[in-house]
Image (tube, rainbow, N blue to C red):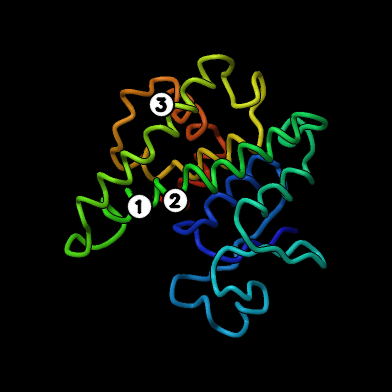
Amino acid sequence: MLRIHGIARSRAFRCIWAAEEAGLPYEVVPVGFGAEHKPEVLKVNPNGKIPALQDGDLTLFESLAINLHIAAKAGAPLMPAGDDASRVLQWTLWAATEAEPTHQQWAYNTYVRPPEQRDPALARAGAEALAPRLAVLEKHLAAGGPWLLGANFTIADCNLAAVLYGSWLNGFDYAPYPKVKAWLDACLNRPAALKARKLREG
């Protein structure tokens, strides 16, 4: 039994979605914002953040690493072998290093922070910095698809779509990136994603 520490309104959403895609039994151990530095939480994530995962004797932190572990347990097609496994790692790291920082700058200054704490200039800068990354993704999807690795949905799709989920849900202008928008629509309306979204949005 996977034990996912966190709440669906955190990055634990990604891990819940991955567990649903994998078809693995899991439970969510509710740890909300503000409780991350309690001693019992620090035992599973010494960084004082959520989520964390317990899988038998294994304890993991970092949501995207957790998802790679979940996918590895499920095997193909969620986690393919060979060169495609390397492509999964590539897109997962791209999600973390290229997409997420600029996406988060836009998000925090658009809908995450209270209105009085938002800086429109930082939101615009985040959107402008995200644009060339989305252009890369648009070109990639136009050349192949429908998923990041071609014919099959993999954990790479889950990881990157989960990173971009907030912008998709909260009005980011995806009109210049129709392939990205169609891909996000397909990812985030999969049955497993809808189950995770119900926990987050409900």
The three-letter code of the residue at mark 3 reads Lys
Crowd class of label 1 (few under 14; some 14 to 19; many from 20; radius 10 Å): many
Which of the two discs, 3 and 1, labels the residue nearer the N terminus?
Answer: 1
> Regarding mark 1 in the picture, which secondary structure is present there?
helix
Task: Confirm or deny contact between disc 2 and disc 3 (CB under 8 A).
Answer: no
Q: Distance between the residues labelled 3 and 1?
A: 20 Å
- The N terminus lies in quadrant: bottom right
* The disc label shown at residue 101, or none: 2
* The disc label shown at residue 187, or none: none
How far across and down, in percent of the image, does residue 52 sit? 63, 64
Q: How far apart are marks 2 and 1 (CA)?
A: 6 Å
Query: How many discs appear?
Result: 3
The mark closer to the camera, 3 or 1, is 1
Q: Which residue is drawn at 64% across and 20% down?
A: 150
Task: Confirm or deny contact between disc 3 and disc 1 (CB under 8 A).
Answer: no
Which of the two discs, 2 and 3, labels the residue nearer the N terminus?
Answer: 2
Task: Confirm or deny contact between disc 2 and disc 1 (CB under 8 A).
Answer: yes
According to the image, label 3 marks what residue? 181
How far across and down, in percent of the image, does residue 145 sit? 58, 18
